[in-house]
Image: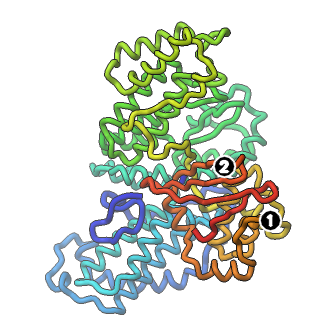
Amino acid sequence: MRKLKNSYEQIPTVSSTEKIMEVVKQNEKPTKKRMSFQLPYVASFIGVLLLGGILAMQLLSQTNNLTNSGKEPTEDTINQTVTEAEIEMAIKEIRGHYERKLGELKEELQFEDAQQYGFVQEAKKAVEKFEQRKNYASQTELTTYMERVNEIITLRVSMPDEEFELLENAAKSGETIKNNQLFGYIDKLNMLHERFHEQWIPLYERNQHTITDITAYVNELNNGNDLTGDPDYLELIKTLRENGYYFYHEGEGYVNFKPDYTNIYNQLVDSLGDDAKLYLKLESEKTRLMDGALTSSHKELGERLLEMESFVLNYPSFLKIDQIKEQYRMYIDVYLKGTNNTRIVTEDGEISNEVKANFEALLNENEYSETAKIVSRYVQKLEETQFILTDELRAEVIELPKVLKPQSEEYSTYTYLLPISDEMIVRYEEFKARGDLTLFYGLGGNTVEMSVARIYMYAVEKGDYDTAYQLSYNGADSELPNQEQFVKEMQQATVDYQALSNDVVKVSTNYEQNGEEINQLLIKENGETIVMHMKLENGYPKVVNHQH
């Protein structure tokens, strides 16, 4: 879901991963090419880069005692004043570094909208903050600030494997990897999942005929064994493995991928805090619902619930604590009611003896836990029905204690709003030509209303207000102005969907008036929410609150 934390000691708050470079002091690496095709290099920045590099060398030569020789800086160097020309030189160097790294990332991803990713936005904000600074007390202060911003750029405007290598090097040097640094990397993997998954689907389907044993095939994918298939398919598998993804069987013969939490744990364990270690353990062992069926036993699911409860109680301020609570809410429901394909009842609808025994063991061995209290209340209701799992009990909402409740009462999906996928961009262009809203159905894992919302935001960010107008609700009760007035208002509005996308991590969708009205609840990482209101117009969802 893509979308983060404290502040740099001497840099104003610029991103969601503050202090991310405090333990990573590495030089920029050369670009690595993995894909079988490339985009044209962004040549327009070359002049800036050359000039910026020369000017920066002149500037840094005045303080090379700090960065190269290892000698203590002289008092003259420390107190040396900084001129406007030198500040301008530094700004050009920083901007040039950012533009070059962005060009390399676009080439790696074959994606011109790469700057819309949240992790790139973090670096962009750091650059903009640097450009706003107009005075420094000394050359040392300027050089230190430059180094920090350059480190942020190198770390964030990069592929995941490059960032992970920097973290590994820091760990090998005995540094502590802080949680916001760890999650900066994991969030990058999650943000890029849509990009890679869009490439994966057609290639996997084209090569699926070679698979005879799905379990063995997934093991081969993860072990890096030689596989047969199209060159592009094999290249993508290599790229996914290199960048830190782990393959798993999602169900119905389909293979998906996710961050390799086990590898992250193994490589960084000695440099992580106890909370991060336990989080990675929970994620690596996370129970998945495959074809609606549990991939672990009912007893193991109970053990997992107790582990998650313990985590929440012991680390209430953990960065991803709400994610753990949401998983707990889902798992307790499955534990008590089963799923369509993992029945916990016999043919006559009665809870099986095995499950009854699991309930009893959990209650006896963990009597004072919050999980036991929840299970006990539900078991009491089952006893009233002679352990028949009635429709009423299946539909009952499990009440959680305050300490285990997620921020949002509604079930939500981790979603990144911008950038949109290649397929969305194609449909966007087709919609501009044809005005056909049916184009927005079946776009990846998005609902049609989510697709419309994301493409609307994309159009606004591109300054394409005519298309945004076409995606705005104009029904009988609409207050939408005419198109000319709408465009004028949007040009003057302060709406910033890129900034919103940087902050939003989850979306919850609520339907009212028999589905005629849709409220997209956009949830920020800090729990704040923004509602994007939509209504059906001739059966298709359109955006109502275009100014909000």
Residue 512's disc number: 2
Asked if residue 354 lies left or right of residue 181, the reply is right
Asked if residue 217 lies left or right of residue 379, the reply is right
- Residue 22 location, x and y as percent? 31, 60
Q: Can residue 361 be seen at all in this image of the molecule?
A: yes
Classed neighbour count for the residue bearing mark 2: other residues with Cα under 10 Å, few (<14), some (14–19), many (≥20): few
Q: Nearer the viewer, residue 437 or 193?
A: 437
Q: Is residue 341 above or below residue 29?
A: above
Q: Is residue 413 above or below residue 215?
A: below
**Amino acid type at image mark 2:** Glu
Which image quarter holds the C terminus?
bottom right
Provide the secondary structure element on which disc 2 rests.
strand
**Residue drawn at (38%, 54%) of the image:** 181
Q: Nearer the viewer, residue 57 or 342?
A: 342
**Amino acid type at image mark 1:** Phe
Provide the secondary structure element on which disc 1 rests.
helix
Whether residues under marks 2 and 1 lie with C-beta atoms below 8 angstroms apart, the answer is no
Distance in Å between CA atoms under marks 2 and 1: 27 Å
Please report whichever mark, 2 or 1, sits nearer to the chain's N-terminal start: 1
Residue lying farthest front?
A: 477
Residue 431's disc number: 1
Residue 367 found in image quarter: top left
**Residue drawn at (50%, 30%) of the image:** 398
- Residue 24 location, x and y as percent? 34, 59
Asked if residue 463 lies left or right of residue 205, the reply is left
Q: Nearer the viewer, residue 393 or 100?
A: 393
- Residue 417 location, x and y as percent? 59, 59
Q: Can residue 232 be seen at all in this image of the molecule?
A: no
